[in-house]
Image (cartoon, rainbow, N blue to C red):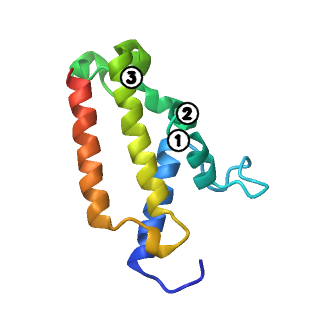
Amino acid sequence: MGGQVSVLGDIYSYGILLLEMFTGKRPTDDMFRDNLSIQQFTAKGLPDHAINVADPSLLLERDDAEADDDRYGADDIQERPVTRYRDRGPVQARRLEECLVSVMQIGLSCSAISQGERMRMDVVVNKMKTIRDSYLSLRRS
């Protein structure tokens, strides 16, 4: 915000990038007018409405079991089978929502206006690894 370049500024940018990736919206989107920001939009949806805030394309999974199959080459028009997150059952759907909420909360923490409230990057890395592991175990089950 016009201050000196610092690691805390990088953390802010990382938080905004996470919010952009997981909401599918840009901070400059037309919907962010009248003092509504991407952070406020995300915060209003958490934790109970994370699915409504998340980019819908994140809620679809391609079947990785067939990802290496030749019939799904880059030039092939045919798409891989897609599973919607709710098709996996209520327990797995809830766990996916928990992963989404966790990542979005990290994005909000990193993009806090006050530098002192921003999460340290070593903490971010550890939390993101935990979320990744949780998500991967969800996909295996």
Q: Amino acid at mark 2?
A: His
**CB atoms of marks 2 and 3 within 8 Å:** no
63 or 104, nearer to the observer: 104
**CB atoms of marks 2 and 1 within 8 Å:** yes
Which mark is on residue 46?
Answer: 1
Image location of residue 116, percent across then percent down:
45, 75
Q: Amino acid at mark 3?
A: Ala
Q: Amino acid at mark 1?
A: Leu
Please identify, in this view, whether the residue under mark 3 or under mark 1 is nearer the observer: 1
Number of other residues with Cα within 10 Å of mark 2, as a class: few under 14, some 14 to 19, many 20 or more: some
Tell me what residue is drawn at x 47 percent, y 65 percent.
13
Q: Secondary structure at mark 2?
A: loop
82 or 9, nearer to the observer: 9
- Work out whether residue 81 can be spotted: no
Image location of residue 74, percent across then percent down:
34, 28
Tell me what residue is drawn at x 25 percent, y 36 percent.
134
* Residue that numbered label 2 is attached to: 49
